[in-house]
Each structure stands twice: as C-alpha cells, then as structure tokens.
Amino acid sequence: MNDKTISSTPARNHGGGMRWLFNKKILFFATLASLIIIPIGVGDDYIYHIFITICLFAGLSTAWNIVGGYAGQLSLGHAIYYGIGAYTGMLMLNSGVSPWISMFVGAILAAGVAVAISYPCFKLHGPFYALASIAFLEVFHVISLNWVGLTGGANGVMVPLEMGWSTMIFTERLPSLVIVFGLMSFSLAVAWVIRRSKLGFQLIATRERESAARGAAIRTVHVRLYAAAISAGLTAMLGTFHGSYLTYIEPESAFNLTFSIQIVLFALVGGLGTVFGPLYGTILLVPITELARGWLGSSAIGLHGFVYGVVLILVVLFMPDGIMSLIQRYLPSSRVRRLDASVENSVDHVPLDDINKPTRPPIGEVVLKVEHLDKHFGGLHVTNDLSFDLHKGEVLGIIGPNGAGKTTVFNMISGFLRADSGSVAVLGEDGHFISPKTPGAFARSGVGRTFQIVQPFAAMTVEENIMVGAFYRFRSVEECRKAAREIASELGLNRFLDEEARNLPIGGLKRLEVARVMAMRPRILLLDEVMAGINPADLREAIELIKVIRNSGISIIAIEHVMQAVMELSDRVIVISSGEILAQGKPEEVVKNEAVIEAYLGKEASDASNE
Amino acid sequence: MELIFSLIVNGLMLGSLYAMVSVGLTLIFGITKVINFAHGEFMMIGMMLTYIITTYLGIHPYLTLVFIVPLLFVLGILVQKYLIEPLRNSDEHVQIFATVGLSIAMINLVLMIAGSDNFNTPSSGMRHTLDLGLATVLTGQVVIMLCSIFMVGGLHLFLTRTQMGRAIRATAQNRNAAQLMGINVSRINMVTFGIGIACVGIAAVLLSPLYPVNAQTGQSFVLIAFVIVVMGGLGSITGAFFAALIIGLVDSFTGFYLGSSLKGVAVFGIFLMILIFRPSGLFGKARKLAHVS
Amino acid sequence: MLRMNNVSSGYGATTILHDVSLEVKKGEVVTIVGGNGAGKTTTLRTLSGLIDTSAGSITFKDEDITHLPAHQVVNRGITLIPEARQLFPEMTVLENIQMGAYRPAAKSRYEQRLEEVLALFPRVKERLHQQAESLSGGEQQMVAIARGMMACPELLIFDEPSLGLAPIVVSQVFDVVKKIAESGTTVLIVEQNVQQTLKVADRAYVIENGRIVMDGQAQELMGNDHIRKAYLGI
C-alpha cells in the first residue's frame, strides 16, 4: 500500500491495481464476517433480527440485480418469486416435506414462472416492462387470495411449530442467521460467477445495445430468460427460508408491491448492475431505518417506507450510480481513468508498421448474392428492385446522397430488417448458398457488420467490447479474451484494452466497432461509414487498416461518404439514389458519370463538367 | 334484462370515475413522456384534504375544489421542476424510480401522520339514490359522470383552441421543433404536469363523498388508471375516456358474475394482453407510440 | 449582424465543431457547404441554442446570445428551419403555421404576415386544413418554410431544405429561398446541393471536419476544385 504500487500499476477498472483489489477484497470479506460476528457478539434477539433482515434483503437484491441490473429489465414484481418460494415451503412443510427439499422445488417452480412471464414481456421496454411486472404481481396476489383450497386465501398458511434443522424453525436466532447468511452468500457467489462468465457479458451487451449484441450472434432473448430464471430461483429459495422464519405467510405480505420495490431500492442504492452493490445498499439502509425507528418510537407505522421513499428520491437525484460509484471514487487507484489529452491525440495514430501485411489474394467467386430487394416504409419506396453480387476478397463501395436508402440495404443484408420481397444468399463454408433470416443467423453464416452510429457497450472495457464479438466462436471466457487481445493488437488498440469504451475518442470508437466485428472472424464484412467524422490524419491509417483486412481474404461492402477512401479502396462502386442503383462500375468511371454528379452536386455541376 | 341494464349503468358510472382519475395521467405521459407512478398518491392527498377541510369547516365537499385544485396544480409544477426536469436526460430506470420513490414517500408520510384508518368525508347528499327506472344510481355518481365528460371535453378544447394548448401539443409531437418556434419547453412541461395533477385533484374532491380514503387509496385506483391509459393509447385523452368506460363495464360485469375479488384478474389480464399484443392501445395507430414515446 | 467567434461545441464529451468563426451581414445570403458529417448541422444547432457552446461566443446585432436557450434565440429574431422538415405531424397545416408565429413579436403581425406568406405558397394555402403528416415531402418542406417565415425573423436559417426531395421540388425550394432573400430577410443556408446554393448565395464558407477551411464570394467558389474534391474525390 505505498505510492509506488499505485503509480506503477496501470489503472484498470475491474480488479486491476493491487491496492484496489486488496481494499475491495478486505472491505468485502470484513463486511461479510461482520454480518455474523456482530450479532453473535451482541447476542441480542433484536440485533439478530436486524441482521437476518439484512442478509435476507441483501440476498434478494443480489438475485434481483441479475435480471434487473445485468440484463436491465426493471422488474417490480419480484415478490412473485419470493411468494412462490414461501408458499411452496409452507405448504410442503405442512405435508411433512423439509424446507431443505421444498426450497429447490420452489426455485424450479419460480424459474418456470419467470420464463413464462418474461418471454412475452421482453419486447416491452423501461416503464412498460415495469408496469407489466406490477400487473403480473397483482394477478398473483388476487389468485393467492382466491385459491382458498391451496393457499388458505386471506387467512394465509401457518406451519406447526416443530423446532429443528429439518423444519428450519428455531427458538434461537443464530441458526436462522446462519441459514440466511449461507443463502445470501450463495446468491452473491452466483452473481459473481455470472458477472465473470460469458452469460454476464452477453447480458450486459444486450442491455447496453441490443442491436449490436444481436449482430454479434448473441441470443438476446435466451440469455435474458436464463437470467430471469436464475434470479427467480434464488429469490424463491430465500422466500422458502423466510416463510419458515416467520412461520406464517399470507397473500398481503407474500405478493406485495412495496416489498418488491424495497428489493429494487437496495440494489439501486448500492449500484445497479454491480456484483456487491446490493449487499452494501442493504447494509446501509436497513440499519438507518431501524435506527430511525428507535428515535421516533417503534410504533410509528410508515416510517420505514417514508425513509425508503425519500432515500430513493435522493439517490436518483444525486447519486444515480449508487454507493459503488462512491467506493470507487474514494479509492484513487481504482478510479476509472479518463483519457488525458495526450492519449486522446495518440489513440488514432497507432503505428501499423509491425503488422504483417499479407499480399492481396486475387478476387474469387461470388460469396453474397442480393436479388431484387424491395422495401417500403409507409408510402415511401426505400429500396426498389435492388440486385448485386459480392465476390471473395472484393471491396464493394456503396455511395449515394443522404437518405438514398444505403443503410436500409445494410439492414436487409444483415438480418435486421426483412425485405418485402427479394432474397439475400450467403455462400456457406460448405460451398452452398444459404439464406439466413435473423441477425444471429447472418452472423453465424459469416456476415459481420458495423453500425453507422457508434455506441460501444459503454460500461465495458475495450477488451470486453471486443470479446462480445468472439463469444459465439468460443466456449470459455479466457479463449474469448485471448482472441480479443489478438484482434486488438492487429487493429492497434492494444494499449486501450482496459479503458472503458466510453472514454475513447470518435476515431478509437470507430476502430473498436471494427474490432468487435473482426473478433467474429467474418468472411463478409459490412462497414457502415467507418470513416465518417475521423481526422484527415487518421484517415490514412484507417484506409491502411481496411486494406490489411481485405488482404486477409475477407470480402467487404462499405457504405462510405469519404470519397478519398472510396476511390482508393473500392474495386467496384455502386451508387444508390432514391432506393435504386443509379450507376455501378470502377470508382474512376462512376464519379465521371453524369447522373452521379447530378445526384450529388445538382444539375448545373454536371452541365459544367460537360463543357 | 333489468339486471343487464343496471350492470351497464353501474359500469358507465364507474368508468367515468376511472376516466377522471386517468385523464391527468395520460396527459402527463403524452407530453412529458414520464409515467407518473405517484399519480394515485396525489389523488389520495386530495381526498385527505377534502376530508379535513370538509369536517373542520363544515362546508360542502365540492366547495373544497376552490382550494384543492390550485394547490395540486402548484404541487405538480414543483414535482416537475425539482424532480422530473433534472432527470430528463437520465437513464430510464432513474426516471421510473423518481416517481416510484415519490409514491412510497407520500403513502408512508400519510401513514405516519394519519395511520391506516379510513376517513369518511360527509356524504352531503351525494349518496342519495336516484331511480332511473331500470337501475338506481347515486347523485354523486351522476355528478362524476357529467364532470368527466366536461373535463375531457374541456381539455380537448383547451388543447386544440388555445395558444397554450397548441404549444403543449406541439411540444408533445416534436420537442425540438417546438423549441425552434420559441416555445419554452420546460415551462410547458411544468404547466402540463400541473394540469395533470389538478385533474386528479378534481377527481379526488368528487370521489370523496362516495369513497372512504386511507393512505393506500391511491394505489388501488392508480393501477386501474395505468390499465386505462395504456389501453386508450398513451397520451390520448379521448382514448383514455373510452378505455375507462370499457374497463368500468368489465369491472361491473366480472364483479357480478365472477365475484368482486376476481375482477382484478380480468382487468389485469386485459392489461397484459394489450401491453403484449397491442402496445399502442386499442384505438391507437401502431405508429403513434413511436413518436409519443 | 451575426457573428460566431472561435466557437467549439459538440455532444457530451465529443467535440464536433472546432474554433468556428463566421459572420453574416444584414441582407446577405450566406451558405455553409461541406460533406456529410463535416459539422454543418451542428453549426446551426449551436447557433440556434439547441446545443450549448463549449467555447467561444456568438453575437447577434451586437448582443451576446452564446448561452441563450433555443426559445430565447427565436425571440431575438433568429429562426431555424430544421433538417427533414420536422412538422408537428398531428396538427393541421394551419396549426403548424400558427405555431410559427408563437414568438410575441410575430403574434401582433399575424394576419398580415399570414397573407404575405401564403401568397408565396399557393399549394400550402389549398391544404390549410389537412393533417401535416398527410402531405407529400415537397409540400411539407413548403409548410416548414412558411412556418419559419411566420416568426418574422430577421435572420432565417435553412438546414438542408432540399434533402430527400425530387429535383423539380428542389428547384422550387430554391426559388422560394431566392424570393425570401430578395424581400430583405437575411439568410443563412446549409446545403448538400452545392451548385444551386452557390448560385443563390453571396458568400460561402466551406467546412470540413468541424473546421472552416475556406471562405469567399460564392461566385469564386463555384468552380473551385477543393469543393469538387470534398464531394467527389476528383
């Protein structure tokens, strides 16, 4: 813990920097230990109760965070799974089945319900998803009230007070604390593992930018369903425990909206999407409300809720990133480094000399066939009977005025948009043409694309961004990381590997966009205005970069406005205007074409050039 | 036959009550793009105040409108100014939790002050039954029905015929272009929020003689208001009105045939169906949602 | 009349305009030309207050308007007719035009101005009571221009008025721009259609990568190789 370690360690966000790692670990394990040691030391029943409450909510919030934070689906109905777990435990205990078994039955049940509920709701975003989750919660509430034969209706369910480990009912508080502590630790471990696994990256990529995630062959619906199921399962296990702890459960407390909101609140206060945020959020908030209750008299109903409401408002106004952002701020070496000016200037001037430049292979057979594409938006005919081919190793430039329909064509040849009629066929590795339909299918058949508006997965580092592209090729995270590093060094992004992507300047972002796609090892690369907005000095390097990619045998279609790049790179150019092919041919020929000059510069210009 | 008729009448009465509660919510969403999760709590506060003023001053509950509507208008402006506007460029989840937090704080503040008891505003003649031949209704219900029609009509005229109303619609349809016309968009948002909350204030006063109020009252109404707002097409005032009538009828019929406890399942079932299969609302064009949200 | 002094601006952390200086004199028609993504639209959005200036200053009639919000810039007499028309789709054409006269100074002259403006756009006059979204692209552009004129601005700014329009409509749009300029309104125009714009304009600025790289009389720039190169690479 001396200054030397700080200065000699490159700043890293996740786990990098010895001092940060050290502190974070100490902080975490000290916190965990204190959750057990303090109540044992004090020995007071009330203190035990508070710590059991902390562990319970920390576990629930951590579980919620897997779907709410990592996947960004703001469920306000998580009490559904808690209730399912609690009822399953109580009802099975009444039939003589131990909670240790019913816990898993409840978890499986809850996971199933979560999948059934989430599947139709994933197309809803933000507040609408939240509303739908509230509505489902309300439905479960009403059902539990009315299915008296099963749930006992409004009277709720009680269990016989048979003490012991097999029923999870104790006169002492300590065993309950041990059990809930174990469950909470299990939740934390699961959350930790997911965050570091492929699933975690895929969830965050999906949350940050769904279109690019789909373009990288991530099954965005599947991964979110896994997250929902895991989260619901963990929530139900804690529900089963809590049922036994309370020995009584009723619809009002089991399927309760305020309870759901509390779970979310702790995660939000701690830091949405962070592994340990929910734990810290709970530890901070539960005691505060308990203390406030002590000052203001224990009979004050509503005090809990009032404090939570006010805290929620204050957090969204002043600390929307939660406690974890504060922890990071006050541990200097962990701080997310902003690029200083000198770095910013140099990011685009990465020398490419050390990259071996293969000689260019000859242009080969047709690898992509686009035939008679037609697309209407409302009354607008955006693509009109468009056909073209792409050959192996060829660079095909697509140019045309703004609004000509170029990006629409890209969307149709990468699966993001379905054409009204016409077909797109990709040459598969087995030598047969296939017609993929979804972005994922296109990606797997070897078509990779960049997006015109560059938005990286902002909360991820450069390395992690590139890894997302490699996911569908490899099983393990480490292999992906290795592949990402290779790509990064090929594309000159090596020293920004640990930088958060949002800190890159525009030139770096464009390069990152290409790197993510290259990590998929595509055979056909679709580039949408990768040269736009970069400095003239960087243009040279960007062009060289594309040449390197081309020389490795990849076929490229590039939408580009920077004419210098179009002229230099393209073997063939297609000019699109008003959704139709206006001209095509060699770049030198195309720019002399009258119709093209007119489309770009207006009529008089073409007249002038004839004189 | 008589039964059906009285169920229909009851449904329409209930529906117009729901319409009053929902109109402000849909207006606020349409213009500021914020779902106000605390909408019901403003109504609850309005009903509480109606109760307090009526019982202490011994005046007719309807007279409290003079005080409560301006008060809620100002409250709405303050909420927009200090809570919603600062978060305009924040993440979606932050905006959601801002009003969720407000809702929790308001409910629990009232719980702390007033406990969880029910308070009954004096009915002041509003619970008189009127015999319509085939069905009977309460005077208060008729007043609500008429007022809801006036409110929807009045808002419609305000939005289409006045300069301020047009500026509000312009802001909703294209915020950018509205600024370029010289419209102070943040002021428009504040006024809109104020009007939306004032509307739920009117609903609160008119409801008071008919319904008891407690800290949780807002929640039970606002969930149905969400259903109506989504069903009517977010941001559409007339859409919300007709959706409210439909939900009123559904409520009345399922309440009778399935029992009052199961009607919630029917209402929320419809809600989920609409959210999932027709998110632009029953009457909305699919495109509408795109530029509304 | 209008002066931008060393203005820089952008979105969030990304700076798009670097050190842009330009001026527009009363009664002039000035154009900014440049390729896609060169910073034309950003310049206009900065001028009109839609995005804030991060460095430098903007003055209009010798008053500082650098950090004024958009609606106050309009009140000073600068109106921007935005790219891609941006009408209020669910309002009628007449309501759209009424919104144009929202600024207090324009309200008092509404009736008279309406007549003047509609005289310029006979097609618009025929469609006053249609929903704006039901109009064709060319008609919508005319409504957008009419709406902008209703504010009685001293400086009228056009952002790509010919974008996505058929060639015949484009020349109509330029006729209108010419008429507006002749009637004494100062005009700043950003266009892709370089040749036609240069014919209308008195002076021009060429912008590349967020920097002004050249300026001069429109006539002189007409045959300039630099412009051809920026657009066509030849």
Image: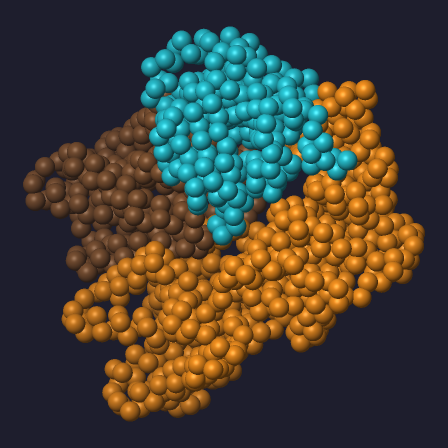
Residue A348 placed where, x, y %?
64, 57
Looking at the rendering, which quadrant does residue A80 occupy?
bottom left
Q: What residue appears at the point 52 percent right and 15 percent down from the top-left corner?
A: C180
The reply, left or right, for residue A362 in relation to residue B177 is right
Q: Is residue A67 above or below residue A174?
A: above
Identify the coloring: by chain
Q: What residue appears at the point 84 percent right and 58 percent down from the top-left corner?
A: A551
User: Which tint was used for chain A?
Assistant: orange
Residue C212 placed where, x, y %?
57, 37
Q: Quadrant of the N terminus of chain C?
A: top left
Q: What residue appears at the point 45 percent right and 31 percent down from the top-left corner?
A: C3
Do we see residue A343 in this rendering? yes
Q: Nearer the viewer, residue A180 or A608?
A: A608
Q: Is residue A403 above or below residue A205?
A: above
The reply, left or right, for residue A13 in relation to residue A279 is right
Residue A121 placed where, x, y %?
54, 54
How many labels were placed on the picture?
Answer: 0
Looking at the rendering, which quadrant does residue C173 occupy?
top right
Q: What residue appears at the point 57 percent right and 51 percent down from the top-left corner?
A: A123
Q: Is residue A31 above or below residue B72?
A: below
Q: Nearer the viewer, residue C234 or B82?
A: C234
Do we see residue B6 in this rendering? no
User: Which tint was used for chain C?
Assistant: cyan
Q: Nearer the viewer, residue C28 or A403?
A: C28
Looking at the rendering, which quadrant does residue B75 occupy?
top left
Q: Quadrant of the C terminus of chain C?
A: top right
Q: Is residue A330 above or below residue B50?
A: below
Residue A82 placed where, x, y %?
44, 69
Q: Which residue appears farthest toward the left when viewing the image? A: B57
What is the letter of the brown chain?
Answer: B
